[in-house]
Amino acid sequence: TYRAAGEALRWGVRVNSVSPGATETRLSDNFATQIGRAQVEWLTRQMGRPAQPDEIAQVIEFVAVGQCGWLN
């Protein structure tokens, strides 16, 4: 993301990345089985709770259309 943002800056293009971590979805159980429940619990503790999909959507909407001209 840093590299792409630096390269795109000269064309006035913003490059951002949203990496939410643990997110509660219908696939959460499959994911926990694949990487291990202890790993998922550790990841979740780092943020206090898993994210909800609509919370991530709010961040993406802000980055895409919000008043955040300095954010890159």
Image: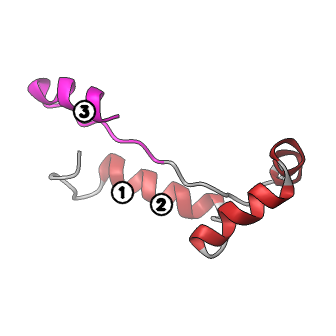
10 Å neighbourhood of mark 3: few (<14), some, or many (≥20)?
some
Q: Which residues, given as a range, are shown in magenta?
A: 1-18
Q: Residue at x 76, y 65 (%)?
A: 41
Q: The disc labelled 1 sits on which kind of residue? A: Phe
10 Å neighbourhood of mark 2: few (<14), some, or many (≥20)?
few
Residue nearest the viewer, comparing 8 with 58 = 8
Q: Residue at x 19, y 23 (%)?
A: 7
In the rendered view, does 51 fall on the left or right side of 19?
right
Q: How many numbered marks are there?
A: 3
Q: Are marks 1 and 2 in contact (CB under 8 Å)?
A: yes
Q: Which mark is residue 5?
A: 3
Distance, label 3 to label 1, CA atoms, is 17 Å
List the residue tagged with mark 1: 62
In the rendered view, does 50 fall on the left or right side of 12?
right
Q: Secondary structure at mark 1?
A: helix
The answer to if 9 sits in the magenta stretch is yes
Q: Residue at x 66, y 71 (%)?
A: 45
Distance, label 3 to label 2, CA atoms, is 21 Å
The answer to if 17 sits in the magenta stretch is yes
Quarter residue 11 falls in: top left
Indicate the position of residue 46 as horizontal and vertical percent values. 59, 68
- Rendered view: 60 above or below 13: below
10 Å neighbourhood of mark 1: few (<14), some, or many (≥20)?
few
> How is this picture coloured?
secondary structure
- Which residue, as the protein is rendered here, is positioned at the far bottom? 48
List the residue tagged with mark 2: 58
Distance, label 1 to label 2, CA atoms, is 6 Å
Residue nearest the viewer, comparing 2 with 64 = 2
